Amino acid sequence: MTTLSIFLDVPEATKDTDKQKEEAHLKDRDRRNIFLGQRVLLSEDSQPWVPLPVKKAYLQIVNDPTRNHEHLPVAGEQGFIRGVIEFALGKDSKAILHNRASGVQTPGTTGAFRIGAEFLHRWYHINKTFSVCLAQLAHDRYRGIFEAAGLKNFCPYRFWDKINMGLALPEMLEDLENSPDFSIVVLPTSCNSTGVQLSHSDWRQIADIIKRKNMSHSSI
């Protein structure tokens, strides 16, 4: 008799709504079916579209004779990390000049969120009633990462206005106002997955609430 696997009690990972929609599309044999829910850009031959600056940077790395295949430091490639911080904050940022900005290199967005969530769970003890504020459109996708790290309180906020096809700013600001002080706000800042770009005015209004309520923020 075959021995039962010791991993039978491991639950199946929950599929997010995007994955469920994609699988339903693949099962539908109607040739008129078109799937518009993919979060990546594809070329005319259905291959991932790579922006020209990314191609240029890739070729520079490949053709750089000084690079090798040795293991990276534990925190990642320091030159890369420094460049990312300067790109995100600006070379003249006071946070950089005062040595208050640092970072680590991670395997993709999911890895970054998990490391960030672990760090916050272990060291963010300023207030026990804080919540993690996630945009409703990304709530299912990222909540599990924060839960696995030990964070349990969540406050979804409205972000996408499906009627006007844009940012639901008044609703978003209202939800953030109603969230507990000292909460962690996770912001969709890279057009993922709606294509919405926050304007300077949007940023100022969001930042005012975050600062006034002593919140911290992260970005998708």
Image (spheres, rainbow, N blue to C red):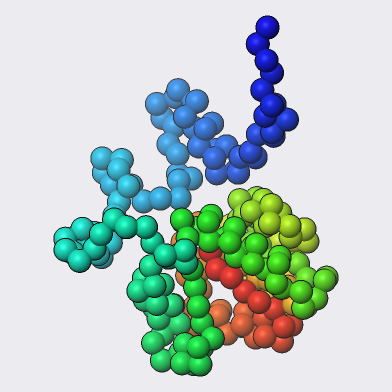
Q: Nearer the viewer, residue 198 or 141?
A: 141
Q: Nearer the viewer, residue 181 or 150?
A: 150
Task: Establish if 194 lies above or below 215.
Answer: above
Residue 168 visible in this rendered orientation of the protein: no
Residue at the image position 53 percent from the left and 56 percent from the top: 111
Residue at the image position 73 percent from the left and 30 percent from the top: 9
Q: Nearer the viewer, residue 220 or 202?
A: 220
Residue at the image position 31 percent from the left and 40 percent from the top: 46
Position in image of residue 5 (x %, y %): 66, 22
Position in image of residue 121 (x %, y %): 71, 65
Task: Establish if 45 lies above or below 137.
Answer: above
Task: Establish if 198 lies above or below 42.
Answer: below
Q: Is 178 left or right of 59, judged from the image as shown? A: right
Task: Establish if 99 lies above or below 1.
Answer: below
Point out the image quarter for the N terminus. top right
Q: Is 184 left or right of 43, judged from the image as shown? A: right
Position in image of residue 120 (x %, y %): 67, 68
Residue at the image position 32 percent from the left and 47 percent from the top: 48
Q: How many marks?
A: 0
Residue 139 placement: quadrant: bottom right
Position in image of residue 204 (x %, y %): 57, 85
Residue 218 visible in this rendered orientation of the protein: yes
Residue found farthest to the top: 1
